[in-house]
Amino acid sequence: MTEDQLTRLFGDATIVQGALWILAIIALVVLIVKLWPALSNAVTLINLLARLAVRLDVIETKLEAVREQVQNSHETNLREEQDERHEEVVKRLDRLDGRLDGTARDIGRLDRRDILRVEETQEIRRSLATVETKTAAIDETVAKHLKWSAEWSADIEDTLNPRKEQ
């Protein structure tokens, strides 16, 4: 570069001013390098804050849906209503428990009666077996007697009516 070109480029600037400009540019580059992580973090923070607004809108919408489900929409206190219903349920369970106790006693009595009836039935069957055995013996005796009577009757008839043989 010629002197003429340098004069046009820098004008009336002196070497000291040029050196100051170079130092200023170097200082600016150093400052940017040193501040780059902080600047990067600041940009990231700004991006997060921008997305945060959108996320807060979504959260607010969901919160409204939850609030509709859990917020009282009636005049009575839900806890008090649950306590009253719990007391009613406990009373009904107590009544049912009493009925079940009575039913269990009735079943026990019926079970004992059934056991007695089974024992009576077994005794009747044993007695019936004895009667059947005795009846069979009597039947056998009667059969023998009838056979003997028939034989005796035939002998007597032959004796009393001798012509019959002729």
Image (cartoon, rainbow, N blue to C red):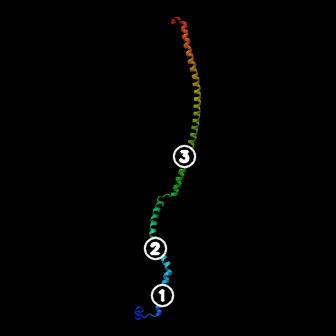
Q: Amino acid at mark 1?
A: Ala
Tell me where residue 160 sits by quadrant: top right
Q: Amino acid at mark 2?
A: Asn
Q: CA distance from mark 1 to mark 3?
A: 95 Å
CA neighbours of label 1 inside 10 A, class few (<14), some (14 to 19), many (20+): few
Q: Position of residue 107 (x, y in %)?
A: 56, 40
Q: Is residue 63 left or right of residue 110?
A: left
Task: For the N terminus, give its image quadrant.
Answer: bottom left
Nearest-to-viewer mark from 1 and 3? 1
Q: Is residue 161 above or below residue 74?
A: above
Q: Position of residue 122 (x, y in %)?
A: 58, 31
CA neighbours of label 2 inside 10 A, class few (<14), some (14 to 19), many (20+): few
Between 62 and 136, which is closer to the camera in this rendering? Answer: 136
Q: Which residue is mark 2?
A: 47
| Sequence-earlier tag: 2 or 1 | 1
Q: Amino acid at mark 3?
A: Leu
Q: Which residue is mark 1?
A: 24
Q: Is residue 49 above or below residue 75?
A: below
Q: Is residue 78 above or below residue 15?
A: above
- What residue is rendered at 57% in x and 20% in y? 140
